[in-house]
Image (tube, rainbow, N blue to C red):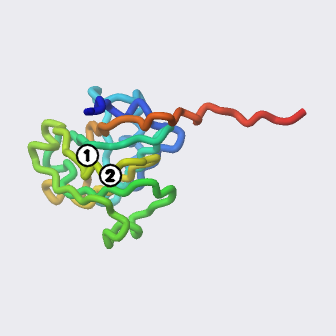
Amino acid sequence: MAESEVSLLEYLDLSQLTCLNETQDHTFKAIVADKKKNTGSAYLESDADEQLLLTLPFNQTVKIRSIAIQSSNVEQAPRKIRLVTNRPALNFDDLEDGGAVLQEIELSEEDVREGRKVPLRFVKFQSVNSLHVFVVSNQGDEDQTRIDAIDVFGMPLQGTRDVSGLKKVEDD
């Protein structure tokens, strides 16, 4: 009874998308705005140091099986990432000690060069409304981290639907 796995970018709620420590010229929104894997020239780049904190909010509850991160500059590509779910207001301090982290992943150069799917501990990612990706370090210990594309794979939960477009009806 295998469920079909799809890119979950189509379920992103772009109005709630955030990234801490991104440069103004190379933002997270630029690489996910089309709600599919970025194949253009846009990329995300960190600002003050190599760390980034990406929040991917979904417009419905999803199950996540794997993640893929790609960078055209392997030295600047993420190496260690920490994943957290369903935390509306996170900052770097919340994730430094690793307390809330569901999974920590060490990405290889091949993973980020080729944008390989990296499997997650599926049981920990069953009812996800938002995924938070903390980039701890990059491959070459560079000052800036670069991500050309990110994709998340899994499936929407049955019985949930996109409510982001609903408007409150005022009583007359």
Three-letter code for the amino acid on which mark 2 is drawn: Ser
For the residue pair 21 and 5, the one nearer the viewer reads as 5
Query: For the C terminus, which image quadrant?
Result: top right
Of all residues shown, which one is farthest toward the front?
1
Residue at the location (18% across, 37% down)? 115
State the mark number for residue 167: none
Q: What element carries label 2?
A: loop
Question: Would you identify the image quadrant in which residue 41 lies?
Answer: top left
Left or right for 57, reference 172: left
**Residue 28, percent from left and from top:** 38, 42
Residue at the location (25% across, 56% down)? 81
Q: Mark 2 highlights which residue?
A: 46
State the mark number for residue 146: 1
Three-letter code for the amino acid on which mark 1 is drawn: Arg
Left or right for 76, reference 6: left
Left or right for 164, reference 100: right
What whole-number distance in Å separates the C-alpha atoms at marks 2 and 1?
Answer: 7 Å
Residue at the location (30% across, 52% down)? 123
For the residue pair 54 and 62, the one nearer the viewer reads as 62
Question: Would you identify the image quadrant in which residue 102 lies?
Answer: bottom left
Who comes first in sequence, dot 2 or dot 1?
A: 2
